[in-house]
Image: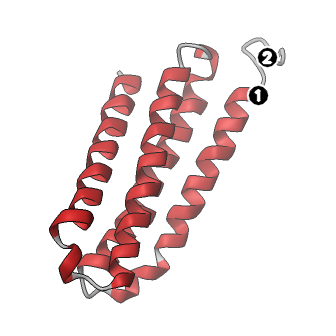
Amino acid sequence: MVVRLCIALAALGGFVSVGVGAFAAHGMGAQMDAQSMQWLETGARYQMYHALAALGAAALTGVLPHRRRVLMAAAALFFAGMILFSGTLYALALTPWTGLGAVAPLGGLSYLAGWLVLVWAALGARAGGKAA
């Protein structure tokens, strides 16, 4: 059930990323300044990368079933990054809330931590204590 939820959330993340990208390119582009456009584009790009990474982590549970919890932790960190990093950039672009800029680095750290946890999932000990 957790893996299916991860797949659904990854797909939703990809959907939002495409929607924001289309909104930036076709909807509000003429009404936004260059900085706001860049925030939307960066947020959408990073969200798509990490939606795919979360989808990959879910798919890897079939290859590394003994590392399922670690893989789901990596996906959770990618989802946190989507909210904290990409979400902050979207809010900066679309609202007057400039104080949110301090939140984006936490999302970047979540993205980075997710990649490190994915490394741990790949290289960590197998069930029974033997290296994979």
The residue wearing badge 2 is: 132
Q: Using the rendered view, name the quadrant where residue 96 is placed.
A: bottom left
**Farthest right residue in view:** 130
Residue 16, x across and y down, in percent:
27, 50
Left/right placement of residue 13 relative to residue 101 reads: left
Disc 1 + disc 2, Cβ < 8 Å: yes
**Quadrant in the picture for the N terminus:** top left
Q: Earlier in the sequence, mark 1 or mark 2?
A: 1
Seen at 24% across and 82% down, the residue is 32
The residue that label 1 is drawn on is 124
Residue type pointed to by label 2 = Ala
24 in relation to 55, above or below: below
Three-letter amino acid code of the residue under disc 1:
Gly
Residue 34 lies, in percent from the top left, at 36, 83
Which percent across, then down, holds residue 13? 33, 45
Residue at image position (39%, 32%) is 6
Mark 2 lies on a secondary structure that is loop
Q: Mark 2 packing: few (<14 Cα in 10 Å), some, or many (20+)?
A: few
Say if 18 sits above or below 96 in the image.
above
Residue 117 found in image quarter: top right
| SS assignment at label 1 | loop
Q: CA distance from mark 1 to mark 2?
A: 7 Å
